[in-house]
Amino acid sequence: MSESDVTLQPAASGVNQWADIFYGLLVAPVRTMRVLTEDESLAANNQTVYGALIMVVLANAISGAVDASVIGTSPSLAILLSAVFQGLVMWLALSAILHIVCGWVSKHEVSLRTALICVGWAFMPLIFVGPMSCFRSLGLVYNFLAIVPVLWMLYLQWLVFDHSLAVGPVRMFALLVLGPPLFLLTYLFWLSFAFVAIAQAFL
């Protein structure tokens, strides 16, 4: 399959669509991300949003379990829930930033649902930290292998913002300078909001 052959059907069943997006990101990530960011009919389908949510939960749960085993800790339910919670907060924060920034600097407005789908699927490479952990006995080689899923995830996130903003390399560089502080503030806001909500539920 080439980049130009990627097609995603909004009307497809949840499992088939999820598998199509997964396979598309493996063999044609640039084209698949472009389709996800530009095809608003995908965002109109609740199954696509739920599929992105499943990917975020699955990827961060696997990543959290592997991180715990690497430091010699048994992956407990608390560790998994913590990893998933942090992943969900990061997902919401990045999606909110993408939606807001597109409204400011881009002629192509990206809905929040589209942002949730694109950013959520960009977490997909983290599921491969599980297979990578089989090579822990290789020492230094494993350290390099373990970086691959993270770099892959950052590349997919870059594609999401690049396709969504379409502002050119200079403005993208400026956003990279201004983006991290904005992301940190948004991340801390959602994290604080979540802790307050949880505290109120138990008080």
Image: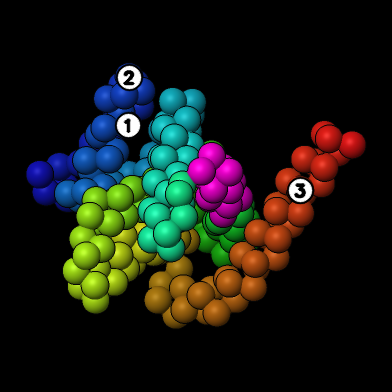
Indicate the amino acid at tag 1. Trp
Q: Determine the CA span between mark 2 and mark 3.
A: 36 Å
Closest to the observer: 138 or 12? 138
Q: Position of residue 161 (x, y in %)?
A: 45, 60
Q: Position of residue 72 (x, y in %)?
A: 42, 59
Who's the residue at 32% across and 44% down the image?
A: 35
Q: Main secondary structure of the magenta part?
A: helix
Indicate the amino acid at tag 3. Phe
Q: Earlier in the sequence, mark 1 or mark 3?
A: 1
Is 3 located above or below residue 11 in the figure?
below
Q: Position of residue 94 (x, y in %)?
A: 55, 56
Q: Which residue is mark 1?
A: 18
Indicate the amino acid at tag 2. Ser
State the SS at label 3.
Answer: helix
Look at the image and tell me whether residue 17 can be seen. yes
Residue 30: name its quadrant.
Answer: bottom left
Residue 47 falls within the magenta-colored stretch: no
Instruction: Please give the count of numbered marks on the rendered protein.
Output: 3
Q: Residues within 10 Å of mark 3 (few under 14, many from 20)?
A: few
Residue 84 falls within the magenta-colored stretch: yes
Who's the residue at 58% across and 52% down the image?
A: 86
Q: Determine the CA span between mark 1 and mark 3.
A: 31 Å
As drawn, is 63 to the left or to the right of 113?
left
State the SS at label 1.
Answer: helix
Q: Which residue is mark 3?
A: 195
Q: Position of residue 9 (x, y in %)?
A: 29, 28
The stretch of residues the image draws in magenta is: 76-91
Quadrant the N terminus occupies:
top left
State the SS at label 2.
Answer: loop
Q: Which residue is mark 2?
A: 13
